[in-house]
Amino acid sequence: MAQRTFKIWRGNKDGGEFKDYSVEVGPGMVVLDAVHRVQAEHAGDLACRWNCKAGKCGSCSMEINGKPRLSCMTRLNSLPEGTVTVQPLKTFPVIKDLVTDVKWNYEQNKRIAPLKPKPRDADGHHRMMQEDVDRVQEFRKCIECFLCQDVCHVLRDHHKHDQFVGPRFMIRLAQLEMHPLDTADRIPAIRKEYGSGWCNITRCCTEVCPEHIGITDNGIIPLKERVVDRYFDPIAWLLNKIRGKK
Amino acid sequence: MADLNEIQTLEHDVLVIGAGGAGLRAAIECAARGVNTGLVCKSLLGKAHTVMAEGGMAAAMGNVDARDNWKVHFRDTMRGGKFLNNWRMAELHAKEAPDRVRELEEWGAVFDRTRQGLISQRNFGGHRYPRLAHVGDRTGLELIRTLQDHGVHQGIHVHMECTVLDLLKDGDRVCGALAYWRDTGRFVIFKAKAVVLATGGAGKAWRITSNSWEYSGDGLAMAYLAGAELMDLEFTQFHPTGMVWPPSVRGTLVTEGVRGDGGILKNKEGKRFMFGYIPAKFAAETADTEDEANRWLKGDKSARRPPELLTRDEVARAINAEVKAGRGSEHGGVYLDIASRLPAEQIKRRLPGMYHQFKELAEVDITKDPMEVGPTLHYFMGGIRVDAESQMTTVPGLFAAGECAAGLHGANRLGGNSLSDLIVFGKRAGAGACDFAASAQAPVIDKDQVEASMRRATDILNRESGSNPFVVQDKLQDMMSHNVGIIRTKSELETAVEKLKELSAEAATAKAHATSQYNAGWHTALDLRNLLLCSEAVTKAALTREESRGAHTREDFPGEREEWVKYNVIIKRGNDGDMVVEKRQRPAGPQPLVEIANSKIEDLEAGKVGADYQ
Ligand code: SF4
Ligand code: SF4
Ligand code: FES
């Protein structure tokens, strides 16, 4: 077993600073294990979020060596040797230490109208082919870690929280828009209320997504295309609608 | 000390504590009935332990094999539970699960499809037919996100990162709870006419567990302290396949779906050992050659099921025996092999989560190499005793649903019966709580109870010095894993009872530093009371049941004892504050259900048994 130093941000909304902690590290350890060791041995009041410790719940997001990541899935041996820097997500206000206030994301979710399904077939079933739901299922893998929200410059640098819902909720919208059963018309709101125009396709969100969801190429770009069809090529949109394409 | 007026007070008709599948479903039911509903989450919304469920939810829809129906599901559940299940709950569950699953689809869930475009269903241990609606190996995430996205539009008051410390009572009935907000460390009183507990189990008392920190048995302990009866706590399920390497992920779940999709278990000699562990009771329905098992997998309806799909208790004990006999894998487990069974592309499509999990955490590519797995504490079959129809506990106004309630699963739970349990009985608990609240008087909060609860919490911060709560929790986990594991004996269980007294004394002086705001040490210290109470209840129940049944195995009392199927072990708080353990006679099952559960499958399907019971 070897010792390793972790530079962890300590503080709250009024400010804070990095503090160094040294703990023993063993095989297979991830950053979250090290944070827990610091809690148990040096700083019992160190705040961090976690639940599943297996990359499934999206609670443990932090910035590790400057990159937004899941701390439970970041193995120490995958990081360059030397001190590991751990700090809270930058895009959201700090509550304490590594914990940020992500309520804004929950408010965005509440703004999105839920599925409005068409009626069931006469025998009581909904029929959907697997190939028609593959894309929707890809988006539904999202664990709401908000790493994409953290990294998107529209939110992170330009603070357009009141005009753009961010990549996480663009794929929530894409998922509803592409859902074979949905009957709601979502395109006007995707443009006006949720701000699809703000995304300039930098793909930073896709890069950090731990679920490897094609946020930009599979989600946002098709939505932008549908917006363009509707507003700038209404004839094509009308033809599609007549042909029954959603 | 406290002026009640200075403490924040929130009032709801129904307060639901816990926001996993059961809690969310209960809250949705209450909101649908137009009742003012509060939902308390220990973490953020959508992060509860339900997200960890992988394989699927069992519902006899018959989409893949039309022979399936509620009676077969009921029969499987009773047999898996070694006939200790609450008859009525097992019946309601099997009957209502299909509607609950279809309702999820209406709310946006997107299950994997059959070729005809219906909800696909997969095979799982103990289920006779392919029955589990699923989404790859992330069904729990689909369930919780569906309920969450639907729930946020129903007018439910969601209270996130809020930990409930104690239930409050008004005379005999429950009237609310005292809680604290994690982000500020401030107290809050919830006043309610009815309370639903949906808090899960207490797996965090063990070292090797698939459970997260939230699983500290809060609901069980609070209900016990409020006077409710607990039941069947000796039945703690060890899931046969948890990760064993590296140490930091020891216990993390490996879905049963791997075996459902054809994965096989091998020892270090490369032998497929499960054929040597088929119990007599299941012999008639289990393949005894590799050839037959393989034919079954290909869909041959005349072939019997592979032994890897025996119930979890059987598989966990078999793995334990192989390791003890020196035939284990490098790090003390056995091998689970899917690589030689399915093409790489299919593995990645059907088990993407597992592929990802092993690749990132263990640096193992499961499309090329076998996984190393071993038993991990996974689930509490036992819990708070409830009424089958309404889910009310023995305390008026207090309801329980999901893992924290007892009855449905008996001595052993079948995989896939948990997610369906959550939605079937979550809805029922919500309805039960609404009915109770409709005729209940406005509750009155008792200042003394609030003060006592607050003092217990603040003492941890205020005392000059004391034990380190992380260290106490660590010791508890080692002790329980060592003395109250898969195979139990009287002497070890008695040692555990003694050790629990020492640990409780240590926990009583736990000290947390700094302020109450988002303080991990303080929180860990607060959880200790609940973990210790649950550990004591499990240990004493295990000592009392002198037989081996389902998930409870006594080395000194091998085999099922006919007499014991007539009893439940009930635990409650005595008048002097000590834990009282009682062996209580169970009511006999209704005749038609008894016949269905005991029937030969051929007779059931030919309509010779139970045909006129609907
Ligand atoms: S691609 Fe769009 S949504 Fe994603 S990070 Fe860039 S600007 Fe933000
Ligand atoms: S889309 Fe990916 S990065 Fe964004 S919240 Fe979901 S899982 Fe996280
Ligand atoms: S703890 Fe759940 S994703 Fe990291």
Image: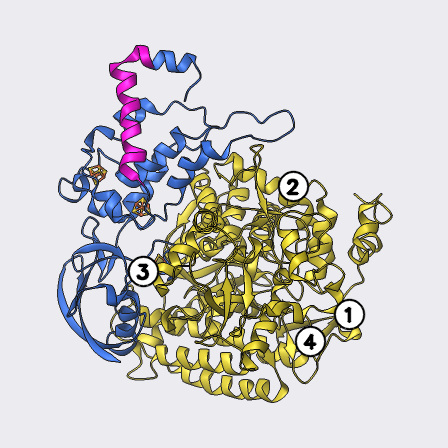
Chain colours: A blue, B yellow
Q: Secondary structure beneath disc 1?
A: helix
Does residue B417 sit above or below A159 in this rendering?
A: below
First reached walking from the N terminus: tag 2 or tag 1: 2
Residue A73: numbered disc: 3
Q: Looking at the picture, do discs 1 and 4 lie on one chain? A: yes
Q: Is residue A129 visible?
A: yes
Q: Residue A246's spot in the image, x, y percent?
A: 41, 22
First reached walking from the N terminus: tag 1 or tag 4: 4
In the image, the segment drawn in magenta is A214-236
Distance from Cα at disc 3 to Cα at disc 1: 47 Å
Residue B61: numbered disc: 2
Which residue position is annotated with label 4?
B548
- Where is residue B98, by image quadrant? top right
Chain on which label 3 sits: A
* Quadrant observed for ligand 3 in the rendered image: bottom left
- Neighbour tally class for label 4: few under 14, some 14-19, many 20 plus, Cα within 10 Å: many
Which residue position is annotated with label 1?
B566
Does residue A237 sit above or below A163 in this rendering?
A: above
Closer to the camera: disc 2 or disc 1? 2
Distance from Cα at disc 3 to Cα at disc 4: 39 Å
Q: Amino acid at mark 4?
A: Ser
Q: Judge: label 3 CB < 8 Å from ligand 3.
A: yes
Q: Amino acid at mark 2?
A: Met
Q: Looking at the picture, do discs 3 and 2 lie on one chain? A: no
Q: Residue B118's spot in the image, x, y percent?
A: 58, 35
- Where is residue A174, by image quadrant? top left
Classified by dominant secondary structure, the portion drawn in magenta counts as: helix
- Neighbour tally class for label 3: few under 14, some 14-19, many 20 plus, Cα within 10 Å: many
Does the CB distance between marks 3 and 4 fall below 8 Å?
Answer: no
